[in-house]
Amino acid sequence: MKTVASFEIKYQQYLDPEGNLTQKKLPKFAENHDELLKMYRMMSFVRVFDTKSIALQRTGQLGTYASCLGHEATHVGIGAAMQPEDAFFPMYREYGAQFWRGVKPHEVLLFWGGDERGNNFSGPQHDFAWAVPIATQFHHAAGAAMAFKLRGEKRVAVSVIGDGGTSQGDFYESLNAAGAYQLPAVFVISNNKWAISVPLADQTACETLAQKAIAGGIEGIQVDGNDIIAVRDIMEYALAKARSGKGPTLVEALTYRISDHTTADDATRYRDKDEVEDAKRKEPLIRIRKYLMDIGAWDQKKEDTLLTECAAQMDAEVKLYKDAGKPPIESMFDHLFGNLPESLVAQRDAAVAEAQHHG
Amino acid sequence: MAKVAMVEAIAMAMAYELEHDPAVVVLGEDVGVNGGVFRATSGLQQRFGKQRVMDTPLAEALIAGMSIGMAAMGMKPVAEIQFSGFIYPAVDQMINHAGRLRTRTRGRLHVPMVLRAPSGGGIHAPEHHSESNEALFAHMPGIRTVMPSSPARAYGLLLAAIRDPDPVVFLEPTRLYRMNKQEVEDNGEALPLDTCFVLREGEDVTLVSWGAMIHETLQAAAKLAEQGVGCEVIDLATVSPIDFETILESVEKTGRLVIIHEAPKNCGVGAEVAATVAEKAIYSLKAPIERVTGYDIPMPLFKLEHDYMPSVERVITGIRKVLEA
């Protein structure tokens, strides 16, 4: 037998868990301290948002919420690398990317607070709503990328999936189509090692998830998803490649879900405490903060000020969320179709009348 | 004006929209150079190019999901599912996303796509090629389901479906693809969605049907007319949402209702028609409502398919039952 094809998967990292550089030459954006600080500020805000959201759920003020604790570098890195005209197709815990793109925190709270108005969010109006069914969003990104390609627009569709999502047929189908059509798309796997209670080793025999790209005939790259510099670097690479007509990329970001799957989950039922403690030492904020302090761009005083600012901003967002109240009953019907059928007009009127009658 | 078969009328409608609306694209398995396995896209790629008429990889969830992404970004994809029993992988995308995106984003995004698929039996096709699955889509909020029953209605309704701002599942009866050619003017005039068509007026009994079974229903009506029975034949056309106004008006006149469909009886669209007539017009009824339908079994392979599908005789028996009640 002879070898007819062989493949390799590259791994990118600039900052190790202790905040030490693992490469001498940094990407251009990372030489600009203001850029790094902007990303660090967003990561810090996302963490405050996450902590507060869990607290809201625990006190009965929010529905089931999917935490992003430990994922901050992955999604802030995605958001920072994208352009507003690009289209984002999130899973459901990429808040950092969405905030970067202009989605308001209270809009995310509205969604988890059981209110569709949360999906009518600020920021780029072409960005998709959260996709709770697993992997379906990759097809939407492929379709958007096809639209951009057909119209000759220099835009890229970016979608995110979890490690569990890579077991779905939709995942393979969209990578395959993106390869066949050479679509301007970047597919990101947020590999946080756990699909609710199923660890990665039970999900797949693959050594890396990035190598699943090979089946689709596209490039797959692994990146330290807790290293904001590496994530943004690889995203900028993949976005530029897609924008210049050189096709799609699959990026596997290695991170860890420090929290429960959602507030409805209890990860202590299935997960080793030592593993979580180890992950906490490798989480993304520690290393970038250490690095920023090492290069003299950050100090404890600035940190304290930032956290106070984040808390105040979050309080204002929580107020907006709480003040939103209940959406009007007729809104359940009014947006179902562009032209509401007669039968639904009757149901809408009945639902409104019922509510008025019984209050 | 040349007479065309339904499959040609369908291609004509797509060609008209490809010609007049740059946002329209056609996609599916073998729709390109091959013109579709039923030839519904015949000649379109040659005329409009590979950018407008695209073959897709063999993956139905992808076809539906990509169409949603394209539609939300301002295109108007007209996607083809090759055979009726192959549509199920696309159902996830249709129910979870196509039908929901507008409402869950409060109108920010919407999905002007058409999912075309062949439907029904009667052409001696292999397994999984002859299913009637309109009830499945009729149960999905946010989606219109349309079934044409003649070349002219296929042309006009498909134009309307492509121009509609929301997802439409367009189920084409394969049995009618090449049956009963008809003059169809290629004038770009759409027919209304959400509207029944009264194909024959009568005073004694209302017959409600759609898709291929319109053919047997009209034949039954013609035979009974020879015996002095006046059947009013209503083609549902838009299977969901149903135009009940036309049906109720007819039932109030005739006092009798027979519903004819090829799909299984249990939870079929006929059940919805019967239930609504019972709710709104039961005092107009002179006899119990009758349904003449397929059986609640998987569509049999073709040696028995004509024993499964309602025949003209079964339709007449059903009509006689309500006339004699």
Image (cartoon, helix red, strand yellow):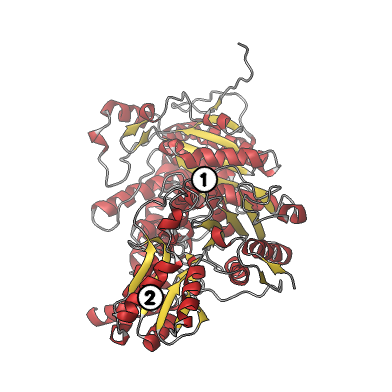
Is residue B256 left or right of A120 when viewed as pictured?
Answer: left
Q: Residue at x 57, y 67 (%)?
A: B161
**A40 lies above or below B52:** above
The crowd level at tag 2 (other Cα within 10 Å; few <14, some 14-19, many 20+) is: many
x and y, in percent, of residue A81 in the image: 58, 43
Tell me the subunit letter for badge 1. A
The crowd level at tag 1 (other Cα within 10 Å; few <14, some 14-19, many 20+) is: many
Residue extending furthest front? B227
Q: Residue tagged by mark 2?
A: B319
**B120 lies above or below B183:** above
Q: Secondary structure at mark 2?
A: helix
Q: Nearer the viewer, residue A245 or A203?
A: A203
Tell me the subunit letter for badge 2. B
Any part of residue A79 in sight? no
Q: Residue tagged by mark 1?
A: A138
Residue extending furthest right? B47
**A94 lies above or below B291:** above
Q: Residue at x 47, y 49 (%)?
A: B302
Quadrant into which the C terminus of chain A falls: bottom left
Quadrant into which the N terminus of chain A falls: top right
**B182 lies above or below A91:** below
Kind of residue at disc 2: Ile
